Structures are given as structure tokens and as C-alpha cells.
Image (tube, rainbow, N blue to C red):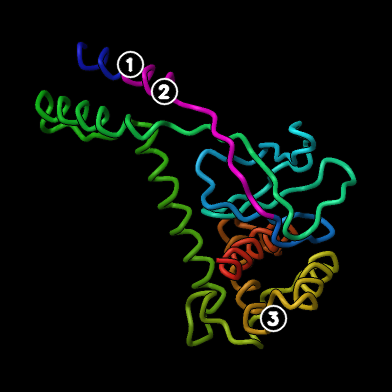
Amino acid sequence: MKIFGVILIFSAFVFAQSEKLEKKGVVTYLSSQNVYVKFDDTEGIAAGDTLFVKENSNYKPVLVVNFISSRSAAGETIKEGNLKVGDAVFVFAIVVKKDNDQIQDSIKQLIDSKIPEQKLITPDEENLSKIIRERVKRTRQIQKERFLDSKISLNSEMSIPQIKKYCPIDSKSQALLKKVVDSGNLSARGYHRVLRVARTIADLEEKESILFSHLSEALMYRLEKTYQ
């Protein structure tokens, strides 16, 4: 019971030690639906967060985040603006101070010494791990069934004819991809890689069709590599 109390105190301490940091990103690409922004990292940024531009030291909201990767974010404009590639945007990210790592290690050592055989994972974390494993397992099964009569078993191994067969996209998604290709930000090889990734994202959500959101997310990952 004492250990549980220590954990609660530590959790409260960590929350108290969280801080809101201003992070600067740069607009790397604009489509008709999303604006893509590159950050040094996206720690503390979440879907639904607001991105701002600075005007005379004032912050003006311009984007709402839809997708996040390790170094990029894609979002919809809040209202018509004049954003362009190269513009700076800002977000206020909630980040836990690094000093807490040492404290967390101390708490972990305390638990280890008191309960040596107890797994250091909460029920919620354990359930989440199981959910992720099951989702990956189902996704692999979907791909296995898809390619049952083929010599491959994964979306990443699809040939161009197979991409055409298994990765149809709607007109809205086609227009987005065409715009990116025409801008010179996506090669023919990159085009097909984006479709493979979009197919996998759809499979993870157990969707039969590739949706615009799946394509946008896959494109974000690809553009992130382009601007690294």
C-alpha cells in the first residue's frame, strides 16, 4: 500500500513538472486538404492541437493537427489564410521535464526491491500491448489472405500490377497524389510506396477501401523522409 502511495505521489509530481513549450515548425507542403509541417520532433504534440503563426508578437491560429509522425504533422486550415511553403508555424507542446527520468528510475528500483516478481506494467499498458499485438496479427492475416494465390505475403512486396489491383483510391486521393507528383516532391517509386503504406494503414483499421485519411497519413510519412 505504501508503494502504491509513492507511485501516486510520483505521478502527481511528474504532472506538476510538465511544461508547455513553444515548438517551431516549417511548412513543407500544401495540398487542397492538408498543410504539412516539419518539426525537429513532435513530442508533446497531439491530434487536435492548434498550430499558430506569429503576427506582431501575437499568435494567430491557422491549423488543427490531424496526423502526427515522429517529426511531422499534417493539419487542416482553420480558415482561409496565406500560408506558403517555408512559413514558420508554432505549437505549444506539453512536455515532461527530462529531470523526471532519474526520479522514475528511483521509483522503479524501489518497486523492484519490494516486489521482485511483480511485472512492472500496469493493467492498462498490458491491455494496450495485447490490443496492438492482436491488431498486427489481424493485419498480417488480412494480407496473407489477400495474397493467398501469390508468391508474396505482405503489402510491402506488392508489384505495380498488384498495387493497381489492391490499392484503388478515390478521385479526391488521386488529385492529391497528382498534385504532389507534379510539384516534384514525389517520384514514381515514392508514389507506389505511398500506396503500399496507405493500403497497410487501411488494413490496420480493417477497412476494405483506402480512404483519403489513409492516403494523407501515408503521404505525410513519405514527405517527412523527403525533407529530412
Q: Earlier in the sequence, mark 1 or mark 3?
A: 1
Give the position of the N terminus as an image quadrant.
Answer: top left
Quarter location, residue 65: top right
Task: Report whether 160 appears left or right of 152.
Answer: right
Task: Report whether 5 appears left or right of 188.
Answer: left
Mark 3 belongs to which amino acid? Answer: Lys
Give the residue pinned by disc 2. 17
Q: Earlier in the sequence, mark 3 or mark 2?
A: 2
Q: Nearer the viewer, residue 146 or 68?
A: 68
* Residue 81, percent from left and from top: 87, 47
* Residue 36, percent from left and from top: 70, 56
Task: Report whether 228 appears left or right of 83.
Answer: left
| Residue at the image position 81 percent from the left and 46 percent from the top | 77
Mark 1 belongs to which amino acid? Answer: Leu
* Residue 124, percent from left and from top: 39, 32
On screen, 21 above or below 142? above
CA gap between label 1 and label 3 equals 53 Å
Classify mark 3: residues with Cα within 10 Å, few (<14), some (14-19) or many (20+).
Answer: few
Quarter location, residue 20: top right
On screen, 9 above or below 158? above
Task: Give the foreground label among 1 and 2.
Answer: 2
| Residue at the image position 59 percent from the left and 63 percent from the top | 224
For the record, the magenta segment spans: 8-26
The stretch drawn in magenta includes residue 22: yes
On screen, 114 above or below 78? above
Tell me whether the residue at label 3 lies in contact with that at label 2, contact meaning CB atoms closer than 8 angstroms.
Answer: no
Mark sitting on residue 8: 1
